[in-house]
Image: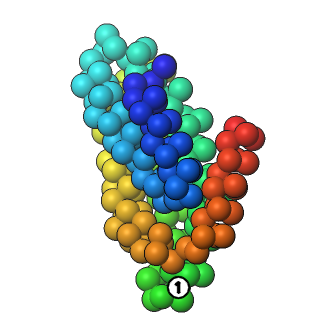
Amino acid sequence: MLPGLEELETKTREAVANEDPTAILLADHEWLRGLLEELRPLARRADRAEEVREAVLELQPRLELHIRREEEAYFPAIEPLMEEAGQGSTFDMYGEHDAVRIRLEQLLKALDSRAGVPDAYAALARSMLVHFENEEELIFAEAPSRLDEEARREVIRRFEALATEA
């Protein structure tokens, strides 16, 4: 079991109770940052490669759910509001998600071959951290004040539907 999941679940339940989809995504980001930091020293050690591989395989569906929540529920709900307010678009985030997926696959290949693991891990971590910053500064800072109560509820309903599909 990946570290920090209990705390993530607690924060997610609180965000759902508060009808705050942005807080759900931010809780994921916080958890993922911590996980990346925890795995970083292990990814540098050849004797811990299998442990990192198992963690990444467990992480993969959770990360995919996070991305799907953003792309299929959150971004569509806020895109018109962001453009209307002159805040730009969520469009670039889709490309960043693709980059994260590619880096994750590259890391898994490196872990399977036991070659280039530290570099592949660093590339994934950088990709994710830059992406989190971009979302948090460009989207999450503005979006909560732009989503009305019904829109927040609908996004959370869609989050929950995506989780049951996973």
| Whole-percent x, y for residue 149 in the image | 60, 70
Residue 139 falls in image quadrant: bottom left
Please state which of residues 25 and 138 is positioned toward the viewer in this rendering: 25
| Whole-percent x, y for residue 148 in the image | 58, 74
| Whole-percent x, y for residue 128 in the image | 39, 49
From the viewer's perspective, is 54 left or right of 30? Answer: right
Which residue in the structure is indicated by mark 1?
83
From the viewer's perspective, is 57 left or right of 68? Answer: left
Looking at the image, which residue is at 60% across and 65% down?
152
Please state which of residues 93 and 163 is positioned toward the viewer in this rendering: 163
Residue 94 falls in image quadrant: bottom right
Looking at the image, which residue is at 65% across and 51% down?
159
Looking at the image, which residue is at 46% across and 75% down?
145
Question: Please, which residue is most extreme toward the front here?
Answer: 17
| Whole-percent x, y for residue 10 in the image | 47, 37
Which secondary structure, mark 1?
helix
Q: How crowded is mark 1: few (under 14 residues within 10 Å), some or many (20 or more)?
A: few
